[in-house]
Amino acid sequence: MAPETCERYTRQIKLPQIGSSGQEKLARARVLIAGAGGLGSLSSLYLAAAGVGHLIIADHDHVELSNLNRQLVHSEATLGKPKVVSASQHLGQLNSAIQVTPVQVRIDQGSIDGLLEGVDLIVDGCDNYPTRKVLNRAALHHNLPWIFGGVMGFDGMVSSFVPGLSVCFECILQDPDTLKPDTIKPETIKSGNPPPNNGILGATAGMIASIQAMEAVKLLLAIGTPLTNRLVRISGLEMRITTAELTPNPDCRACSPSNKN
Amino acid sequence: MKIQFNGLKETIPQGLNISKLIKFFDEGDPHVIVEQNGRYIYPKNYDTCMVMENDMIEFINPNLGG
């Protein structure tokens, strides 16, 4: 390892779970950051800082002023720019030794397979259920782990999905928009696809994205105990953190062998 | 019967299953995630899963923003 590389990562190389060999593994890793918003911008910063060798940043959107309370990879200087360009510029300034590939694209069934070429792991930065369903199905198809994160207001949740080893995203969450209208009491709906311009504190995304970044390193290096078959939920106002054990859903349409569609 | 519901002590009637508990607390979100004593309970099991004394129950509304 080059002396400059050793110096940059010395604080994490000291960790016995990482060491030089782990650092070299991170340098060879290729990670898709699916979305460059609140979650993706923060997880990508930590993964770039940790020395993940190749980050692919995918997003279709442009930087807006209202993004800047939480999307810390962007700035006033990049207002109006494609988020992936803004993100890759900042990440390149943070760590010029890694490769960052910006892909300005809407993540959907048409684009996802191309985005996953050579990828080792996916970090979720999506902001809606349908796109996460695309990620989930693609992850199952390509046998790739992915780290789900979701936030709203002061609250967030996170889990790691590893095909064949854990429940999948659709085991535990169904599309909020698939209900018939007469079964919904609008005044009681607190979850689901967030409405446009929903409220969120930047630190909320920070909490969840940090966990996602840590999970990514753990899965890439096969260290520690990943959040597979566990769902962590943080309620920020009360600072309550709950962890639920998950078991496979035999009725899951995505991963249950008897129900796949 | 006393349980812990979303971190707070609550008194509920005896003999409730998860379905009835959802109605008792007037939880209208059909996608609420229910945890009982740290375990995720699938909706198909709501009718058969009974709430017991001192259970720790969480109703969680999924966060899907990013």
Image (cartoon, coloured by chain):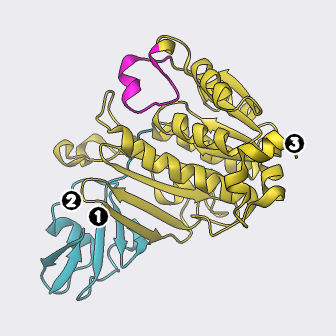
| Residue placed under numbered mark 3 in the picture | A2
Q: Residues within 10 Å of mark 3 (few under 14, many from 20)?
A: few
| Residue placed under numbered mark 2 in the picture | B27
Callout 3: SS: loop
Q: Considering depth in this image, is B1 or A61 the residue closer to the camera?
A: A61
Are dots 2 and 3 in contact, CB under 8 Å? Answer: no
Chain at tag 1:
B
Are dots 2 and 1 in contact, CB under 8 Å? Answer: yes
Callout 2: SS: loop
Q: Which chain is yellow?
A: A
Please, which residue is most extreme toward the top here?
A80
Q: Amino acid at mark 2?
A: Glu
Q: Residues within 10 Å of mark 2 (few under 14, many from 20)?
A: some
Residue drawn at x 27%, y 40% as measured from the top left? A181
Q: Amino acid at mark 3?
A: Ala
Above or below, A16 against B47 in this view is: above
Q: Are marks 1 and 3 on the same chain?
A: no
Q: Considering depth in this image, is A95 or A44 the residue closer to the camera?
A: A95
| Residue placed under numbered mark 1 in the picture | B59
Q: Is residue A187 left or right of residue A9?
A: left
Q: Find the magenta span and give its range.
A: A62-76
Point out which mark residue A59 bears: none
Chain at tag 3:
A
Name which quarter of the figure residue A166 lies in. Answer: bottom right
